[in-house]
Image (spheres, helix red, strand yellow):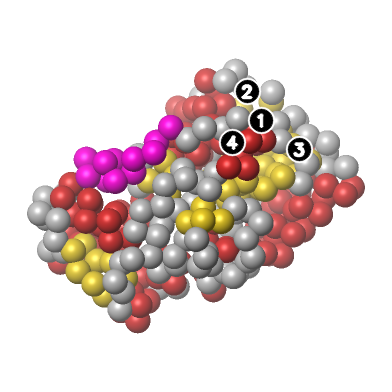
Amino acid sequence: MRVFLTGGSGYIGRATIAELINQGHTVEALARSERAEQAVVAAGATAVRGALTDLDILEDAAARSEGVIHLAQAISGDEDLAAATAMLDGVGGGTYVHTGGSWVYGDTDGVQDETAPWNPPGAVAWRKPVEDAVLARAAGGGRPVIVQPGLLYGGDNRLIDDFFVQPGRKNGAIPYIGDGGNHWALVHIDDLAPLYVAALSAPAGSVYLGVGGVNPTARQVVEACAHAVGLDGKTTSITLEQARAEMGPIADAFALDQQFTPATAKRELGWEPKHTDPLSVFAQG
């Protein structure tokens, strides 16, 4: 299959390009800079120079493709929807895979799936109208699919590293919010990339949580990280107010208590997460 991908130079993008190439697909990837172009070419894709706001470029690249995977992070809901619309117009009856996120469901009451009600924190509240508009294209003959990744780990592990591990290194103890008993719905990068590829064959209008099915507490994760970075397991509690001051709006997302199952993607796509012991990965650093 000929696939066009945005966000190819990023953490998820490079892994997804590699998986696409490994499965025999041909990939074009958007590259907004020379550095991004070098990254996507090194990963095995052909670069398409342009930015997420270059709607004509997006539509033309999608029109050359049989499937599209949109991974790039937009700066607003309006920008994300405009890009999605251009690529949906371009790919026509081909599959368009859009990236959402598990945080949109807010706190969960036990283990939930894609039927859980939405209750997003402010940082991701803009996703609802975008995803609704994307899925609505199925009624007109489009093939939209949404993948909602959980909190990523493995590889660069940027979010947890940037907001928890690095401040912890500086201060001598890695923080957790409140009592740290809230659960994190994790997914390993090496599991998420195959899900995106599998989603190219999904039925129109499908939504899949990209989670590993193992939901440790935030405190368990940061304790494992604290051992891995030589802090002898030292952690410290901070209030949500402190977290907001230090992390910004994303603190409310990190404070969510979320447990999810990947059962839908397993059943419909045959996707099987292989990384089922995230704490051992964090403990190894």
Res. 282 visible in picture? yes
Residue located beneath label 4 in the image? 266
Determine whether, in the image, residue 251 is placed left or right of residue 172. right
Task: Check disc 3 and report the residue beneath it.
Answer: 203
For marks 1 and 2 on the same chain, the one whose residue lies earlier in the sequence: 1
Mark found first going from the N terminus, 4 or 2: 2
Q: Is there CB contact under 8 Å for labels 4 and 2?
A: no
Q: Residues within 10 Å of mark 1 (few under 14, many from 20)?
A: many
Instruction: Report how far apart the C-alphas of labels 1 and 3 lie in the structure.
Output: 17 Å
Q: CA distance from mark 1 to mark 2?
A: 6 Å
- Dividing the picture into quarters, in which one does residue 198 lie? top right
Q: Is residue 277 magenta?
A: yes
Q: Are marks 1 and 2 in contact (CB under 8 Å)?
A: yes
Query: Foreground residue, 44 or 172?
Result: 172
Residue that mark 1 sits on: 3
Looking at the image, can residue 170 be seen? no
Identify which amino acid the numbered label 3 is placed on: Pro
- Element type where label 1 sits in the image: strand
Q: Secondary structure at mark 3?
A: loop
In primary-sequence order, the first of circles 4 and 3 is 3
Stretch in magenta = 274-285
Would you identify the image quadrant in which residue 6 lies? top right
On screen, residue 115 above or below 192: below
User: What amino acid type is highlighted by mark number 2?
Assistant: Thr
Residue underneath mark 2: 26
- At x 48%, y 56%, the residue is 259
Is residue 243 rendered to the left or right of residue 257?
Answer: left
